[in-house]
């Protein structure tokens, strides 16, 4: 035993992490005694053997214990009824495992002075997390099936122990009165136990039983006692066994602390952390990493009531360590998921229509007979990564999925980790990390570059987001986490202007890009709003840098945008657009004030051609007014197709709710004085007679005097009406029949006139919208009819194209009718104008 103890290791624990090197200490002691030279040599040899072989011996023990505890856990999980009869075996296994873990901690932290490579390797155990995990698993089983153990040992004590003890008492030849009372008490206590007490969750307390046994030992161990315990060894052993059985009923927690407490890790913090990180980096051990946070709950056991000052320090340490470990586990899982998501996004991107050109080009080249076969490049089609020759060849994605499976097993192993009075939920850590990562990924995939004004197409972004979501959805297969909650939280935040971190969102980035970049490029020229394509189409001049506006503004892109940012985001986009319109209207009002006197004369003399002609020459900033009205029209046309896209998306998502909103809009009997229905309809993408968001934006700039404000609006209407003939002079005013729009976007003035004047007169509150629109039609018709009398060819260059504007205004207006137009402007002129512009475009195409 002496040699065995010396060869099992080179240090012995004094207290916690304080150790003593036993061989050098004993050698120093023997060195002072004469005649102990042989013993000295023996200790030295044992020390050498310990350094050489102890590490390997204990490594093999841990290897055996890993397998043994794993099998024990599997058997007891399958047959919990064995927890009772095999309890002692379980606690023996836990004791062995704990001792081996403590040996490794002591010797790893205190290596021998002369250490060789092999010995150093034996002191680093990469499989230690597995042993710790199986220990925690057995502890969890003991807690889970404690009632099974109680039932077994209560029946054992009452049905067997009490009977056997009674027989032994009867067979005693001598039994003094005091000893007899104690033995009878022990027997009666055991015999009176019933299973019903366990079923009723009665709290057991056998401390009195165990104290009686201590008293009995005291009485029977003194000199001259009639009943000498040494002479009744069988009785002593049996009562000792009964004491163990009572502890199985009322003191399981204390037994677990005695046999499997790992609170020593609290004082070996560096080894504890290094083992955790080693486990995190070793995929084969990832599933056992949850053992480290669970061990933090043991730290409470190393405190002592006689040393209260260290209690706070140990408590803070255990709480901080468990938090750090769970944080790092969740972060690692998040990084793996992110890598998988990025790979899936890349694969989804390869399936986009824009990549089909490469496939077509490859097929075209294959048809050509190329003699030089060395130049042929193998074309890899999307999906080739799914073909496998053998199952043994693991791809990077396979390894990532395996690592994710293992790590998620650990995170999902227990719903909570209780440390001191705090409860930690590992899944919530992962949930928070995924939420933060998904939010950043969503904004990152927009790829908005303010310097180059580049941004991802909404349709491509939607494909990437769906690929990302598919991967995140699959996480539910690994861990019990509500990914839908992540989606709802993150995607809802992306529909607002800023997220919960105060950062820009998808909605704010696209609102900024469409309002400040795309629409400004449209206003700059060479981009036309096509009414039949429902998109802005580029008319790139030769030599200019191409910019395909239709790739960002067609109906498919705007549908994708509506799916991404939802009604909230589309409303935010609308409010931004209306703010731009309101600022343009303010400038128009300033121009009206400058020309107020002339406009009043034009309004009262619209039926006197000579006066109109003379007064029109006095008007200032006519082109400015037309340009601003065109800009407003472009913005409104974009908003119109955006609203249509939103409505189409919502009709697919919430058809019943949309049908109810339409019913409200159509069936409301007394108008909409509170604008509640109008706001609701506008938010759902439905068109309204008077746009409520535009009204809100314009009302903020309303003048204080209502009469004056109404007059300015009327004069603005006159200004626009009498300025329409000026459009015929511009080369860009030519109507492109193939696009159903004018090259300079003057056809967008139709929605501008209808929406702006509808909103402005609605704000004035005089209820004369229809009358004022009729007045506008009369002024515009008389002004355009005078174009027919013009002799200046320059002034009537695109007269027919401008005539069509009047037809568009009436078609889009909820207040004007075609009959009214016929009474002011002969429809035959409009029909001839359509015929002429279609004919001109055909001639230009053929030439």
Image (cartoon, rainbow, N blue to C red):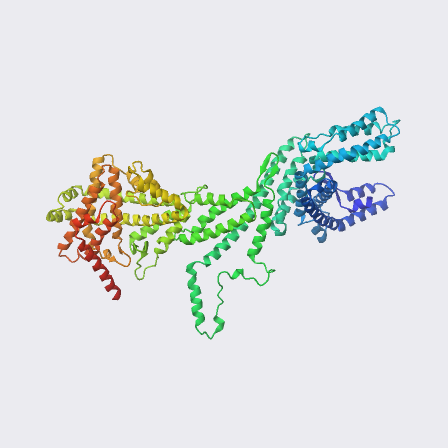
| Residue at figure coordinates x 56%, y 53% from the top left | 401
Say whether residue 666 is left or right of residue 323: left
Quadrant placement of the C terminus: bottom left
| Residue at figure coordinates x 45%, y 70% from the top left | 366
Q: Nearer the viewer, residue 810 or 60?
A: 810
**Picture coordinates of residue 656, whole percent (x, y):** 39, 44
Q: Quadrant of residue 18?
A: top right
Q: Nearer the viewer, residue 206 or 743?
A: 206
| Residue at figure coordinates x 64%, y 33% from the top left | 311
Is there any visible trace of residue 484 in the rendered image?
yes
Say whether residue 747 is left or right of residue 39: left
Quadrant placement of the N terminus: top right
Q: Nearer the viewer, residue 19 or 74?
A: 74
Q: Where 659 sits versus 249, above or below? A: below
Q: Quadrant of residue 162?
A: top right
Number of marks drawn: 0
Q: Nearer the viewer, residue 571 or 522?
A: 571
Residue farthest along the top direction in this orientation: 177
Say whether residue 325 is left or right of residue 645: right
**Picture coordinates of residue 602, whole percent (x, y):** 15, 44
Say whether residue 61 is left or right of residue 345: right
Is there any visible trace of residue 456 in the rendered image?
no
**Picture coordinates of residue 125, whole percent (x, y):** 68, 49
**Picture coordinates of residue 351, whole percent (x, y):** 45, 59
């Amino acid at each position: 035993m002496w040699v065995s103890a010396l060869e099992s290791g080179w240090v012995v624990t004094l207290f916690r992490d304080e150790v003593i090197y036993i061989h050098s200490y004993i050698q120093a002691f023997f060195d002072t005694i004469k005649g102990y030279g042989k013993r000295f040599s023996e200790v030295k040899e044992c020390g050498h053997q310990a350094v050489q072989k102890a590490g390997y011996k204990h490594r093999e023990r841990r290897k055996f214990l890993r397998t043994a505890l794993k099998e024990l856990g599997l058997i007891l999980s399958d047959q919990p009824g064995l927890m009772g009869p095999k309890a002692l075996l379980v606690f023996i296994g836990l004791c062995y495992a704990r001792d081996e873990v403590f040996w490794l901690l002591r010797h790893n932290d205190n290596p021998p002075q002369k250490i060789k490579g092999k010995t150093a390797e034996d002191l680093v155990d990469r499989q230690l997390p597995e042993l710790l995990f199986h220990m925690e698993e057995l502890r969890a089983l003991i807690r889970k099936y404690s009632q099974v153990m109680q039932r077994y040992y209560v029946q054992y004590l009452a049905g067997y122990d009490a009977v056997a003890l009674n027989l032994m008492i009867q067979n005693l030849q001598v039994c003094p009165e005091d000893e007899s009372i104690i033995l009878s008490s022990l027997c009666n206590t055991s015999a009176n136990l019933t299973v019903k007490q366990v079923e009723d969750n009665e709290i057991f307390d056998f401390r009195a039983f165990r104290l009686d046994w201590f008293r009995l030992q005291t009485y029977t161990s003194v000199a001259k006692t009639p009943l000498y315990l040494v002479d009744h060894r069988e009785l002593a052993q049996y009562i000792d066994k009964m004491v163990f059985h009572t502890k199985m009923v009322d003191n399981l927690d204390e037994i677990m602390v005695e046999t499997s407490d790992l609170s020593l890790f609290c004082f070996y913090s560096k080894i504890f952390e290094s083992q955790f990180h080693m486990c995190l980096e070793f995929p084969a051990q990832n599933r056992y990493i949850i053992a480290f946070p669970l061990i933090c709950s043991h730290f409470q056991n190393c405190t002592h009531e006689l040393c209260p000052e260290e209690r706070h320090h140990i408590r803070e340490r255990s709480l901080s360590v468990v938090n750090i470990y769970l944080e790092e586990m969740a972060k690692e899982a998040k990084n793996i998921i992110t890598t998988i998501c990025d790979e899936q996004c890349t694969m989804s991107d390869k399936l986009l229509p824009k990549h089909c050109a490469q496939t077509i080009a490859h097929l075209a080249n294959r048809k050509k007979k190329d003699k030089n076969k060395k130049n042929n490049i193998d074309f890899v089609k999307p999906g080739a990564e799914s073909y496998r020759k053998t199952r043994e060849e693991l791809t990077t994605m396979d390894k990532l999925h395996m690592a994710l499976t293992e790590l998620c097993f650990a995170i999902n192993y227990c719903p909570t980790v209780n440390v001191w009075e705090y409860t930690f939920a590992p899944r919530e850590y992962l949930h928070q990390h995924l939420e933060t990562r998904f939010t950043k990924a969503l904004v990152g995939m927009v790829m908005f570059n303010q310097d180059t004004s580049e941004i991802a197409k909404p349709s491509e972004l939607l494909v990437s987001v769906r690929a990302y979501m598919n991967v995140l959805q699959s996480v539910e297969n690994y861990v019990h986490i509500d990914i839908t909650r992540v989606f709802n939280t993150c995607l809802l935040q992306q529909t607002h202007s800023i997220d919960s971190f105060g950062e820009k969102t998808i909605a704010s980035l696209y609102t900024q890009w469409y309002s400040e970049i795309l629409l400004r490029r449209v206003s700059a020229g060479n981009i036309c709003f096509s009414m039949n394509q429902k998109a802005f189409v580029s008319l790139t001049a030769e030599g200019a840098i191409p910019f395909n506006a239709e790739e960002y503004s067609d109906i498919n892109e705007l549908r994708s945008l509506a799916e991404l940012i939802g009604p909230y985001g589309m409303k935010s986009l609308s409010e931004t657009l209306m703010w731009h319109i309101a600022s343009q209207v303010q400038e128009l009002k300033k121009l009206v004030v400058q020309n107020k006197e002339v406009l009043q004369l034009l309004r009262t003399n619209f039926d006197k051609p000579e006066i109109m002609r003379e007064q029109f020459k006095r008007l200032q900033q006519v082109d400015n007014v037309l340009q601003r009205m065109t800009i407003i029209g472009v913005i409104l046309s974009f908003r119109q197709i955006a609203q249509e896209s939103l409505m189409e998306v919502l009709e697919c998502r919430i058809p019943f709710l949309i049908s109810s909103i339409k019913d409200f809009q159509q069936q409301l009997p007394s108008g909409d004085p509170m604008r509640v229905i109008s706001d609701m309809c506008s938010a759902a993408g439905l068109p309204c007679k008077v746009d409520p968001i535009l009204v809100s934006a314009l009302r903020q700039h309303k003048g204080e005097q209502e009469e004056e404000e109404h007059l300015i609006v009327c004069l603005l209407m006159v200004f626009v009406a009498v300025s329409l003939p000026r459009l015929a002079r511009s080369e860009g005013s030519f109507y492109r029949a193939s696009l159903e729009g004018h090259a300079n976007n003057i056809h967008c003035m139709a929605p501008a006139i209808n929406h702006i004047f509808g909103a402005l007169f609605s704000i004035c509150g005089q209820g004369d919208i229809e009358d004022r629109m009729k007045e506008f039609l009369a002024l515009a018709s008389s002004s355009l009819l005078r174009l027919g009398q013009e002799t200046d060819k320059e002034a009537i260059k695109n007269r027919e194209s401008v005539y069509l504007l009047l037809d568009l205004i009436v078609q889009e207006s909820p207040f004007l009718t075609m009959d009214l137009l016929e009474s002011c402007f002969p429809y035959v002129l409009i029909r001839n104008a359509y015929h002429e512009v279609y004919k001109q475009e055909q001639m230009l195409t053929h030439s």
